[in-house]
Structures are given as structure tokens and as C-alpha cells.
Amino acid sequence: MERANPVLEVRRGTKRFPGVLALDDVSFGLMPGEVHALVGENGAGKSTLIKVLTGVYQPDEGEVLFQNEEVSFSSPKESQAAGISTIYQEVNLIPLLSVAQNVFLGREPRNRLGLIDVPRMNREAREVLERYSIEADPKAPLTSLSLGLQQMVAITRAVSIDARAVIMDEPTSSLEAREVETLFGVIRQLKEAGIGVIYVSHRMGELYEICDSVTVLRDGKLVHSGPLSELSKLELVSLMLGRELDEVQKKGATSFGEEERASGGEPILEARDLTELPLLRGVSLDVRPGEILGLAGLLGAGRTETAKAIFGAGQLDAGSVKVGGREIRTGSPAAAIKAGIAFLPEDRKSEGIIPDLSVRENIVAAALPRLSRAGLVSEKAQDEVVQRFMQSLGIKASGPDQPVRELSGGNQQKVMLARWLCMDPKVLILDEPTRGIDVGAKAEIQKLVDDLARDGLGVVFISSELEEVVEGSDRAIALREGAVVGVLSGDEVSERNLMGMLAEGGAEGGATDGKQENGKQENGKQENGGTP
């Protein structure tokens, strides 16, 4: 039986940028009806390879083939018209347009007069949404949908253009569990239709559930390509990191330290009865200097809402926040910053970095008042701050004047950390700080968080990955439907206990049940451990 040809292929592809060999003699092939994982650390060459395949970049050497014919796409629009559709990690749609308008953006059905046929567009959008089990009203403005549903609309748009190859870049980063299952259903339908899927993700569980093959890139080079079933998760991580397997086996699942941190004393942060209906329902927590408090919960449980409520980015119906024993004004980020609270948001692209500014300008953005004298900003003081944090945090950039948008995701996170650390905060709130970054950058961020806590900062650490919460936290709080359902400390902090709380509001092995009475847990487990 004759073997099928790849639907999309690059042969010996090489791409150079000034001072960087981004893609070095890489060959890659996507078969029809195959889900092919593309993995590697930031800077490994994944994005460059995708951009070469879709016409954003032209290869300096090598060739690109689509459906067994050599092609030279001049733009992503041209590659999409040919049948290659790309779904990016950040939703790339127009929020003020309707769901249907976004699904058919640029290819709206028209009537005999050449006008957009709105009833037909809404009808066909509903049909394609229902085909992939996506529950969204075609007439609703996109901005009225959750971030997860917006991503599903982006996926619907991508797969509805009669594509032969679909590229998915971290498609589940903003999806909840139910939406992930819907996405996997969409992917399985694409497989059955003979459509090839390139799947970029850092979530190992997803790769092993949905992918057939895997290609590993490292430093712009191809280091492995073959069936995913032939590699264990540990072997795959080893290939990505370029380390010997026995070296990887010596490490834990994360890079948080195993030694206990010297946390204690009076709480540096106290939040009481934070209520913002229907999102938050009486959330209370505290954090001591040198302590990492983990917040666990499914998407929609209230983790981000709790972080924003503490930081003042939202109007509370009730509740209070204290820093160092002094109550601060809620609903005011300026008051929170002045009191010593720093907040790294989940969406670094739209709420964190200032992409068109340089690394230098992003780092000093919050500290300019401190660096100014009589209204004049000292360039020397700026340089000293920037150099100190670029060196101490290991920010990899060509220099402080490089636009921050050109940095990898992990280095963008470090720039945001530097921005806040130069303000000498007392409390650091981190909302998904390792989301969407590679294994190596994730390990660096985890170690940085650990070191900051050892230096005496109180840290609130939010992660959708339970192993991060378990290994990184001194205590952990479980949130469900906007309320605290339990708090764990010490040896009680385990994935089993947290999952039990998230599912049922309780945990096995005598862990807390989340009920509070005068700041104590009713079963006595947390009497001296601080209120949840």
C-alpha cells in the first residue's frame, strides 16, 4: 500500500535573523488526518517554523510544500486561502462584532445586490457552531462571551474555511475542562475528515491524550520526530531540555525548592469577606511574610477575581483588605500599590506588558515617580535599576532598548516581575505566571518565586496546574463557585486533597472542609494556621 504524502511539509528549512539562527536545517511533515505535537522551549524555533509554514516569513534556505506541491506564500491570508488555518494563543478576533460576523470575517455571504446576507450568515454560523457542540449565540457580541468561549469561536472560524491543515497554538490556555473536551471533539472530527492538525502546547496531559506524533525543537534544531507513544513524558521533557534522563529524574515536577521557608509572624496581607456578586461570595485569606499561599480552583472558581479584588481592580459589594495591619481603600489599584501590593495579571499581552515600548521602559514604568527629582527623570538611575533586574532575573534580551514584544513569553514575565520588584513590594500576587511559557522558562519563574518568598515577600500564587500549587505552596486554598471551600497546610497540601475539595468541597484524610468560625476551621485542623 502506497504511503500518503504529507499535507504540509518543510524540507531543510533555515531562517536567520540578525545575530540569530532561528531555524537550522529543520524538516517537518504533517500527514493527513494526523494530530502532530510541536514542542520545545521558548526560543526553540516553534513560532518561526509556524510562520515559515504560513507565509509570515520566507525561508532563507529549504522549501515548503502544501499538498505535495512547492509553495511560497507571501502572507498568512494567502496561506489561509490555500487551506492552512492558524489559531493563536491570544484570541485574534474583533470583540465588538457578533459571533457570526467573527466566524465569517472577510468572507461574509452576500445577496444578489452584493450586500451582506445577515440572516444567512447567522444561520450558517449557528450550523457550524452546533456541528462542533459550541454553545454560543451567533447574534451575541463577541465581547459578551467568556474568554474560553471566544477562543472556541476562533477555533470555529479556523475550521470552517475548508482547511486541509489546521495549526493550533496553545488552544486550551483559556479554556475550562468542559471546553477542552469540546475542543478535543472538534479535533477528532478533523482527523476523521482527513485534516492534519499541528498542536502546540506545554500541557503534557493534553499531548498524550490527543496527539499521534511529536516533533521536538531545541535552539532552532530538530532533535526528535516520531510517534508520541514511543516516548514517556519524562523522555519528552528530557529531549526538550537537552538534559540527560537521569538528571531530569533527580528533579521534582517543578523547580520550587523542597526546603521550608521561614514564614511566620503577623499576616502581611489580610483579606476579609471579599464579595462581588455573582463572582465572589465572602472570600477570606491571609498571607505572612515569606509565605507562598496557593489558590486552586477550576476556571470560573474566582481565582482571578480574588486577585483583582485584593489589588483594587474591581468594585466590591463588601469586604476589606489590610496590609501590615492597616486597612486600605478597596477598588483602588493606586491605594494597593502604595500599600505595597504588586499584581502580575494572567493576560500579560493586554494587561501586563506595553508591547511597543522597550524592555527598559517596561521595567521602569511603575517606578518613574521614585526615579524623578523635581519632575526630571534620571537616566542614570533608570539604567542602574534596569541593569540590576535584567541581571538578577536573568532577562534574555539583546539589550534594554529591545522592544519587549520581541522577547519570549518567559522573558516578558520576568520584565513584568522586574517592574514590580523595583517598587519594593510587600505582597506579590501572581496570576498564572507560568501560563503559556516553555518548560525551561517555567522552571526559572518557579525558582524566582521561591527565592522572592525566601527574601521575605508574601506571595499569592494562582495556577491551574495543581502540581505547581502543591509543590510551590506553604498553604493552599481551594475555591469553588466564588467561595472558599477549604484550606490546606503542610503535608495536607496534596493533589488528591485539592481535587476532592474542588469537586465536592471537602477532602480526604482529615483535611479541612472550608467552614469558618471566627477565623478558625471547625474541625480544628487550621486553628493556628491562619484563616483561609
Image (tube, rainbow, N blue to C red):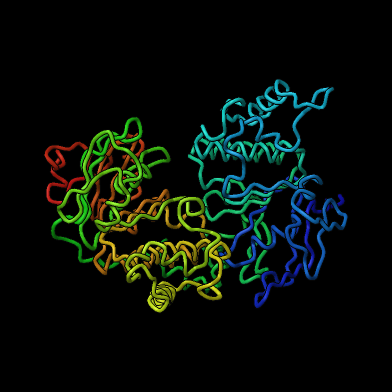
Instruction: Using the image, determine if residue 402 lies above or below residue 107.
Output: below
The residue positioned 68% from the left and 36% from the top of the image is 189
Q: Is residue 408 visible?
A: yes
Q: Is residue 510 visible?
A: no
Measured from the top left, where is residue 58 in percent x and y?
Answer: 77, 63
Instruction: Using the image, determine if residue 18 lies above or below residue 103.
Output: below
Q: Is residue 119 left or right of residue 306?
A: right
The residue positioned 55% from the left and 48% from the top of the image is 206
The residue positioned 63% from the left and 26% from the top of the image is 130
For the residue pair 40 and 493, the one nearer the viewer reads as 40
Q: Is residue 112 left or right of residue 334?
A: right
Q: Residue furthest top?
A: 119
Q: Is residue 95 left or right of residue 296?
A: right
Instruction: Using the image, determine if residue 371 lies above or below residue 167.
Output: below
Instruction: Using the image, determine if residue 139 lies above or below residue 477.
Output: above
The residue positioned 33% from the left and 47% from the top of the image is 307
For the residue pair 366 and 487, the one nearer the viewer reads as 366
Measured from the top left, where is residue 474 in percent x and y?
Answer: 26, 57
